Structure formats: C-alpha cells, structure tokens
Image: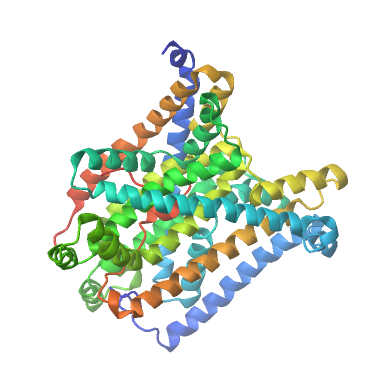
Amino acid sequence: MSFLADNFALLRDAFLTTLSLAVLSGICALLLGTLLTAMRVSPVKPLRGAATFYVEVFRNTPLTVVFFFLAFGIVEIDLQFPTRFITAVAALSLYTAAFVSEALRSGINSVPPGQAEAARALGLGFRQTLTSIVLPQAFRTVVPPLGNVWIALAKNTSIAAGFAVTELAAALVRLSNENADQLLTVFLAIVAAYLVITLPSAWLIGVIERRTAILR
Amino acid sequence: MSTSTVLFDIPGPQARRRHRIGSFIGGLVLLALIGLALWRLGVNGQLEPARWAVLFDPNSGVPQTLGNALVRTLQVAAVAMVAATLLGALLAFGRLSDHRWVRMPATAVIEFFRAVPLLILILFCLLYLPTVGLRVGPFGALAIGLTLYNMAVLAEIFRAGILSVDRGQREAASALGMRKSQVMLLVLLPQAVRRMLPVLIAQLVVLLKDSSLGFIVGYFELLRSARSLVEFFNSRFGDLYTFQLYVAAAVIYIVVNLLLSALARFVERRTRRNTKVAATAEVELPADVQMGGGGGAVPV
C-alpha cells in the first residue's frame, strides 16, 4: 500500500489524463457524429455519400491505425498537432464519431414517421424538422447505445499509451518496469482506476435513460 | 422511420439545381484540399514512383514482409477467434445454467473481462504471467488477451442467441425426453448459431482490428512490421519509404476488414432467406462491441 502512496502523484495525473482524454474526445465525437448523422439523412445526395463513406472507412479501420496516421502520417503533408495529447483526442474523436453516427441513425429510424410528417405538414423545413422534432426524440432513445459508446471510448483511451501520452496504461507500463515485485498491486490499481470511470458512468447512463424515457 | 424521404420533400427542379451548384462548389473545395495534400506530398517527394515501387518489388523484401505480417495478423486472430468461441459458448452455457454455483462464477468472469480494457489484459499476460512462471511471448500475450476479452463478448452474443430461440423448441425437446445437455446442444445451439452468424462474423472483424494492438506490445503484426521495415529502410536510405509503408499497412487492414464485413452481409442475406430461421428480428452488434480495442459494456 505504501508503494501506491509513493506513486500517488503519477497515478493521479495518469487518471486525470485518461479522464480528460475521454471527456474531450467524447464531446468532439458527439458533435461530429451528430453532424455526420444529419448529413446521412439530408436531402443532398453527395452529403449522404460522403458521410456514409466516412462512417464505413472509420468503422473498418483499427483505432491504432488512426492513431498512427495522425501521429506519424500527416507529418508528410506538413501538418502536425501541437501536442501528443491533442493528437490522441483527434484520433479518438474521429474514430468514435463513426460509431456515434451509427447509434444516432438507428435512433432516428426509431422515431415514428408520423412525427416528421406532422412537422412537415406544419411547414417546417428539413433543418427545423431534424433539430426541433426528430433529433430530440432520437437522442432519448439512443441513451443506452450512446452510453455504451462512451464506456468503450473511456477504455479505448488506453491505446494512447502506445503514442506517448502518459495515461493509465502508460503509467501501468512505467510502474511495472520499475517495480517488478509489485506487479499485481499495480495491475489492480490501474483496473480499479478504469472501473472508477466506467462503473459510475454505467449507473449515470441508467439514471439518464430513466429520466429521459418517453412512452410510446 | 425510414430515412429515405420522410424528413424532406423530394427536391424540385430549383432545389436540385441548388444542390448541383452546391455539390459542384463542395467538390471543387474537396478537390482543392486533396490537390493541396498531394502537392505537399509531391513537394516532399512522396509521390515519386520509385518510392511506391518498393511495395511491389520482391527484391526489396517488402511484399514478403507485409505478406508474412498479414499471415501473422490472421494467425493470432484465428487462434483467438477459435479459443474465444469455444470458451464463450461454455461461459454462455454456464450463465444460463440452472445451478447457482455455476451461474454466479460464469457471470462474474463475463462481466469482469468486459469491463477491463483489452490493452490492460494483454499487458497483464505479457508482464505478469512470466513472473509466475508462465512464459508467454508477445504472440501468446496477444492471443490470450484477445481470447479473454472476446470470449466474454461472444458469451453474451451466444446467450442472446439462445434466449431468442422460441421457448416452444426447448419445451418440445424436453417433452421428447431429452436431457438438458441434449436440449442445449442438439436443439437450441444450432438454431442460436445460425441466428447469430452475422454477428459472430462482425465480431471477427472487431477481433482482427484489435489484433493491431500487437503494435503496442511488440508482436510483429502488420502495423509493427511496417514500422520495423520503416526503421530498416530509414537506417539505410534515410526517410524514404515511411509514408508509403504506412499507407500500405492501412490499406491492407481496411481491405481485409471490408471483405469480412461484406462476408457478414452475404451470410446475413443467406440466413434471412432460409425459411428455418425466418421471423428472426434483425440482430445487430451493439456499437460498443463494434468499437473494439477494449470496448464492451459494463453491466447496467
């Protein structure tokens, strides 16, 4: 236990890095994913095509490869993210947005057609129908899947360890290299740190789901 | 709601013209961006044919290395897939068991391995197992990690499949005097597997994607091999082939995954045509499972 106390600063910083990675990427992915979904149901065919292409590509690319390209690939076109942390946020956001979009699209499909028909009968345009009628209902039905995406994202942040971001998995590697005798304690601490993020999230998702549920 | 036309009117001539103009301008901007990227690549000399030729030149050893790497990627994915399927089926039986002392441990195992990031599992196998006398290399660590995580995911898929079989089937089988194990193996499992086949294949795609985590633990799968090739060439010719090799690795990944996804869709169409499994609700893998890389839900 004293061992954990000695490395408390490292573990705390790593935990906070993981948490901020997850929160920032989660927000960016939610925004980008919503935009992609709007494109996928829009009247403009090229927009639909572009968004579908994006989703298909990112769903079929390993997250590690996305990381890799943003860390080492885009240097070749003279672009570079200011820090490794921002690279990680970008990779996680781009990857997760595809899954957010998939979840949201199934939510839009579950909104009864009568809602959109009524909105259009009242004279609302596509943008108004989507933003004030359909999306608010869609978001409510996809709380559980979006919550799962969020939890998966929280765990996916561990891949940033391979790209020089000192989050929990990287702290794990560093601590285990220095303290071969304490390996089990280190692993337990790191797993517990992840559970501190995921278990309350799961609970909170349940609460939000009950609060926002709509009877049909 | 079908997303086709409920949300908007079919565009009229004026709207269509607006869309055309918009698409044209958007296309121009996109082309300009791609052109800009290509131009930067060109300025940096990345587009020279000689640099790309190395990918296809057997004398350079690159096609062989990437081919071997693909085989190694598929190897670890295949080992993990078979082991995870068997263990997953066992865990699913365990979780569906009538006996509390079987059900509880199985449930605990499933929920634990779904809640821990895959990378942590792999690192655990790589770093901890050798200290207790189990020598596993990067291959073993990757295979065991992928197996542990995916068996938990697959167990849930199997369980959902078995529970989705009409209960009349189970009751009829019991009425015929079958034992519980016979009911499960001869009646429920075949129907469940046929139902869950598309989902199982989708999970194979996820597993294949996850094998790229070998990059971090030093297993020479595609990505790691590409990197070692890059390091090899860098030491001899300088920073010549970096970009090309990474692009090749990424393209191989995407193509293999798209092929598997297409296979999953094909199988799905086949099974849906099959009258024996008719009236099955469309099954889809939850988004968190598809995300892989340590995904999976925590019990809610």
Q: Residue at x 35, y 31 (%)?
A: A196
Q: Quadrant of residue B190?
A: bottom left
Q: Residue at x 75, y 59 (%)?
A: B63
Q: Position of residue B94 (x, y in %)?
A: 28, 46
Q: Residue furthest bottom?
A: B13
Q: Residue most toward the top?
A: A2
Residue A101: image location, x then y, percent:
40, 60
Camera sees residue A24: no
| Visible residue check, residue A44 | yes
Q: Is residue B117 above or below residue B175?
A: above
**Residue under the image location 55 percent in, 20 percent down:** A180
Q: How is the image coloured?
A: rainbow
Residue B136 or B119: which is nearer the viewer? B136
- Could you tell me which quadrant the N terminus of chain B lies in? bottom left
Measured as percent of width and height from the top left, residue B3 is found at: 34, 74
Query: Image quadrant for the C terminus of chain B?
Result: top left
**Left or right of B13: which side holds B62?**
right
